[in-house]
Image (spheres, rainbow, N blue to C red):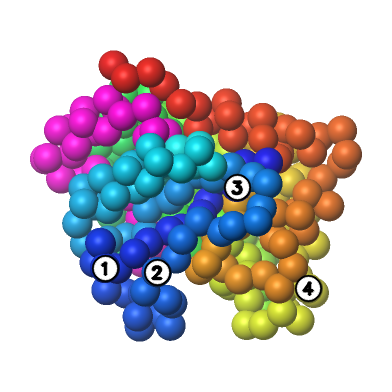
Amino acid sequence: MIDTHLHVWDTGAVRIPWLAGAGLPARAPIPDGQDRRYVLVEADAPDPAEEAAWLISLAERDLRVHGVVASVALELPQAERALASLAEVPQVVGVRRLLQDRELFDSAALVEGLKRLADWGLPFDACVRDRELPRLLALLEQVPELTVVLDHMGKPNPRDGVAREAWQCNLARLAELDRVHCKLSGLPAECRDADELERHAPDIVDVALETFGAERCLLGSDSPISQDPKDWCERVLARVPAEKRQAVAEDNALNIYHRRDAR
């Protein structure tokens, strides 16, 4: 199994100020005792290059790490230099630029940055809130050559029925772009407690699976930001038909987040 969305950090090595305000620990290591590999995803450090270097060093030392999704401010002029540097690193398997709650969707510079990312052959992790899915769709339609992984199923609201209907419709529109894939992750962080997660997880995961198809879905725990009293990855796999579990558990991750030789 490949958990394609694990956050790790050590604020003694890399400063990430928002963690303390969110009640998260100062250090989050790779979990022990699980027979799986991981894709380490950036955690919005103020210095993306510093965080990327730390994650890459961890990937070089720990065989459990399949790869790293690093942060790049794709709308800035220095993005090309950052991408060229990251593309030389075999452990880097993708790039993320957080879009949620940020006025970047209409940025022409971001579109150009996404095109440069596509030229380097690296997939883009898109992290948005459910209400932002139409703006994400409009953005991605301008870069049809880009491989995209939608983080956290687009962050559906488990409590608002109207918002859930809109999310389902917008998810279907996004799935019409055949280079977009869906990460089955992040729902525990959107739920108020374990009971709410238990009630809503089956329907939400089923909608995402049906919309994208198992051949375009990946597993991600989003740990430790998302905390499931059960094992989230096993919870998701239980919703997948037995004959398609290998694809969701591992094969799709290997195809999308493939390690590349240094250029």
- Looking at the rendered image, the quarter that the C terminus falls into is top left
Between the residue at mark 2 and the residue at mark 3, the CA separation in whole angstroms equals: 19 Å
Q: Which residue is mark 2?
A: 27
Foreground: disc 3 or disc 4: 3
Q: Residue 107: x percent and y percent? A: 24, 48
Q: Amino acid at mark 1?
A: Gly
Q: Amino acid at mark 2?
A: Arg
Q: Please give the label number shown on residue 12.
A: 1
- Horizontal side of 237 relative to 263 (left or right) equals right
Q: Which residue is mark 3?
A: 3
Q: How many marks?
A: 4
Local secondary structure at mark 3: strand
Local secondary structure at mark 1: loop
Q: Which residue is mark 4?
A: 198
Region of the chain picked out in magenta, as a range: 72-101
Foreground: disc 2 or disc 4: 2
- Horizontal side of 179 relative to 206 (left or right) equals left
Q: Amino acid at mark 4?
A: Glu
Find out whether the residues at labels 3 and 1 contact each other: C-beta distance under 8 Å.
Answer: no
Q: Amino acid at mark 3?
A: Asp
Foreground: disc 4 or disc 1: 1
